[in-house]
């Protein structure tokens, strides 16, 4: 079947309402990071302070996500994601109150970290639902699961277009506090609805997927997490670098819009990845897309204006989604089926930790040397990802081929 037919089958399987619901539930994560960065930077007048608070939020998310993913594997997504959604919404509102009340930076950073612990990783948890959903409804179709992963990456990237754009618009029209309040309301409403959707019950009911003695953390998975960390550095460094560039130009509200263009190219590439032939293996896709990220990020070192940086960032997005899809798809094949939630959230945590590091370093460099120094950070993150992808390509290929020979892989593989 063609990818277009597969996309229509996904809508029929889960229902159009679910796709909209799961998409909107992702927005608070993207809104929270940029909203915190702009809120604290505006209140303190220091990019490094904003980067520190945003990074603390990201680190909290990175620490909390694998724990929540493991709990969801054991207890089901419904109670876990519902508690996370309501708790993180409360945390965002508390963060606004602290900043507007003039709380000290350590207090604000601590509050951001605690809020991050509760922010649900909707994208990775949505990925976990597709394989059992496809198996239960139509008996299993690896290519359809692969198409679902392509869609989920496109949805992730689209959320990082709309989320920052919403923040940028609210900051330009009102102020950064409104952006975080909006993120809290969306999370409380749509995050809870995502938790309670019937697909959550299907994801937790996975007979026959347990593998006795199956390990979660292998060398290959650890490298994939590190690769995702490099991609996260690209995100965090780009977002902060663009914020420095936009603020120095006197238009801080445009930072979110410019950063959102990274997701435009990435979302388009994510959808198109479903057309790649199966013989073009995940390890090869990872190497090629990582090399493309380095080449497309390099012009950030020489662009003098926000408009020029926006063009470069849009092109850079074309390489980001294929790399992320390859990492997630490879991980889904490598781990025991009953550990899928923990594995997906662990990869997401790698990206979040990378984001935190990229945002913090770029913020410091922006304070010291301006936007060009800050925008060198995503170039370095892309280069690190390429080195890791090259180093693990052969071992990953062997592991994927070995996994493909097992009976379990014929059911759980994402092609």
Image (cartoon, rainbow, N blue to C red):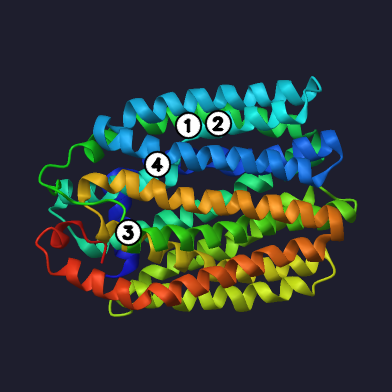
Query: Which callout, 2 or 4, points at the residue further toward the start of the chain?
Result: 4
Side of 266 relative to 4 (left or right): right
Query: Which callout, 1 or 4, points at the residue further toward the start of the chain?
Result: 4
Mark yes or no: residue 167 visible: no
Q: Measured from the top left, where is residue 3 in percent x and y?
A: 33, 67
Question: What numbered label is drawn on residue 389?
Answer: none
The CA distance from mark 4 to mark 3 is 14 Å
Crowdedness near tag 1: few (<14), some (14–19) or many (≥20) residues, C-alpha within 10 Å? many
The CA distance from mark 3 to mark 1 is 27 Å
Determine whether the residue tagged by mark 1 lies in a helix, strand or loop.
helix
- Name the residue at 40% across, 30% down: 81
Determine whether the residue tagged by mark 4 lies in a helix, strand or loop.
helix
Query: Which callout, 2 or 3, points at the residue further toward the start of the chain?
Result: 2
Q: Which residue is mark 4?
A: 66
Q: Which residue is mark 3?
A: 331
The CA distance from mark 1 to mark 4 is 21 Å
Q: Mark 1–mark 2 contact, CB under 8 Å?
A: yes
Q: Which residue is mark 1?
A: 190
Above or below for 93 versus 413: above
Q: Which residue is mark 2?
A: 186
Q: Mark 4–mark 3 contact, CB under 8 Å?
A: no
């Amino acid at each position: 079947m063609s990818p277009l037919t597969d996309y229509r089958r996904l809508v029929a399987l889960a229902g159009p309402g679910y796709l909209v619901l799961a998409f909107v539930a992702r927005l608070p994560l993207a809104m929270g990071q940029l909203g915190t960065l702009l809120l604290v930077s505006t209140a303190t007048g220091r990019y490094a302070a904003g980067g520190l608070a945003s990074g603390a939020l990201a680190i909290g998310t990175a620490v909390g996500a694998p724990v929540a993913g493991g709990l969801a594997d054991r207890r089901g997504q419904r109670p876990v994601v519902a508690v996370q959604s309501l708790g993180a919404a409360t945390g965002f509102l508390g963060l606004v109150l602290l900043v507007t009340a003039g709380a000290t930076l350590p207090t604000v950073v601590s509050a951001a970290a605690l809020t991050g612990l509760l922010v649900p990783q909707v994208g990775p948890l949505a990925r976990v639902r597709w394989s059992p959903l496809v198996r239960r409804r139509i008996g299993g179709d690896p290519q359809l699961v692969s198409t679902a992963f392509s869609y989920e990456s496109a949805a992730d990237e689209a959320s990082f277009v709309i989320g920052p754009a919403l923040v940028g618009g609210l900051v330009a029209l009102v102020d950064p506090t409104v952006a975080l309040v909006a993120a809290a309301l969306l999370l409380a409403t749509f995050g809870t609805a995502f938790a309670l959707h019937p697909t959550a019950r299907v994801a937790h009911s996975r007979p026959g997927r347990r593998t006795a003695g199956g390990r979660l953390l292998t060398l290959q998975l650890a490298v994939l997490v590190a690769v995702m960390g490099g991609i996260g550095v690209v995100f965090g460094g780009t977002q902060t670098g663009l914020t420095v560039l936009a603020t120095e130009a006197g238009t801080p509200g445009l930072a979110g819009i410019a950063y959102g263009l990274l997701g435009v190219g990435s979302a388009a590439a994510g959808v198109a990845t479903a057309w790649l032939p199966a013989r073009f293996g995940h390890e090869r896709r990872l190497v090629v897309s990582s090399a493309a990220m380095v080449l497309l990020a390099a012009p950030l070192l020489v662009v003098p204006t926000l408009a020029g940086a926006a063009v470069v960032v849009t092109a850079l997005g074309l390489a980001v989604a294929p790399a992320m899809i390859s990492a997630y798809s490879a991980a889904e094949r490598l781990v025991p089926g009953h550990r899928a939630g923990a594995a997906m959230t662990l990869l997401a945590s790698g990206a979040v930790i990378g984001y935190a590091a990229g945002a913090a370093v770029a913020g410091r460099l922006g304070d010291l040397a301006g936007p060009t120094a800050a925008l060198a950070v995503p170039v370095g993150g892309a280069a690190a990802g390429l080195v890791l992808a090259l180093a693990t390509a052969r071992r990953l290929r062997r592991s994927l081929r070995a996994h493909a020979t097992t009976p379990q892989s014929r059911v759980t593989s994402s092609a």
